[in-house]
Image: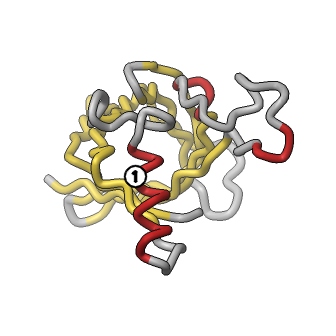
Amino acid sequence: HNGTVNILGGEIKNNHGQLTGSIEIDMNTIKNSDIKDEKMNAKLVNHLKSEDFFDVVKYPKATFVITSIVPVTEPKEGTTHTVNGNLTIKDKTNPISFDATLITQEGKITCVGSAVVDRSKFDVRYGSKSFFEDIGDKVIYDDFTIKFNVIATR
């Protein structure tokens, strides 16, 4: 499925060319964009927000803390930098790294890219073969992809 989740806010710091920062994600804003039937859409979204997945009542925010952004040595598909950081979902923090395109112009920093996240590392268990070996054809893949276009302004 495809959907969106909103960013609450964040900041990027430039310390003599070393970029760091953080982003807060509002898990209550999970939306599905590919199921057109309203009832089925609501059923999926409510399930994703439930204790089975992201438990947004108990964990309303996720965070990504950028530890470094470094130029890639061999750009591919337009990427310019590797972003390294710590992602926290459901109070579980794990390092992630991904390539992105970073553009700085007119007082803005734009970061475009995607990151693959393994939900099992954040204790999101429902339908995961990592936790339930005998799940058969009911398995839901552990990896999900986050695509983003974040613009930071001064």
Residue 13, percent across and down?
A: 24, 35
Residue at left 54%, top 64%? Answer: 2
Q: Dot 1: few (<14), some (14–19), or many (≥20) neighbours within 10 Å?
A: some
Query: Which quarter of the image is occupied by the N terminus?
Result: bottom right
Q: Give the vertical position of 1 relative to 74 (above or below).
A: below
- Picture coordinates of residue 123 (x, y %)? 54, 23
Q: Is residue 47 above or below residue 79?
A: above
Q: Which of 18/39 is in front?
A: 39
- Between 20 and 143, the one lying in front of the other is 143
Q: Is residue 70 left or right of residue 5?
A: right
Q: Out of 28 and 94, give the one closest to the viewer.
A: 28
Provide the secondary structure element on which disc 1 rests: helix
Is 24 on the left or on the right of 74, as rendered?
Answer: left
| Residue drawn 31% across the image and 30% down it | 59
Question: Which residue is under mark 1?
Answer: 46
Q: Residue at x 62, y 47 (%)?
A: 144
Image point 43% across, 33% down: which residue? Answer: 51
Residue 139 in view: yes
Q: How is the image coloured?
A: secondary structure
**Depth check: 78 or 22 in front?**
22
Residue found farthest to the front: 39
Q: Is residue 19 visible?
A: no
Q: Position of residue 48 (x, y in %)?
A: 46, 47
- In this view, the residue farthest toward the left is 154
Position of residue 106 in the picture relative to residue 124 (left or right): left
Amino acid, disc 1: Asn
Query: Can you say whether 38 is above or below 79 in the image?
Result: below
Does residue 43 appear left or right of residue 18 in this picture? right
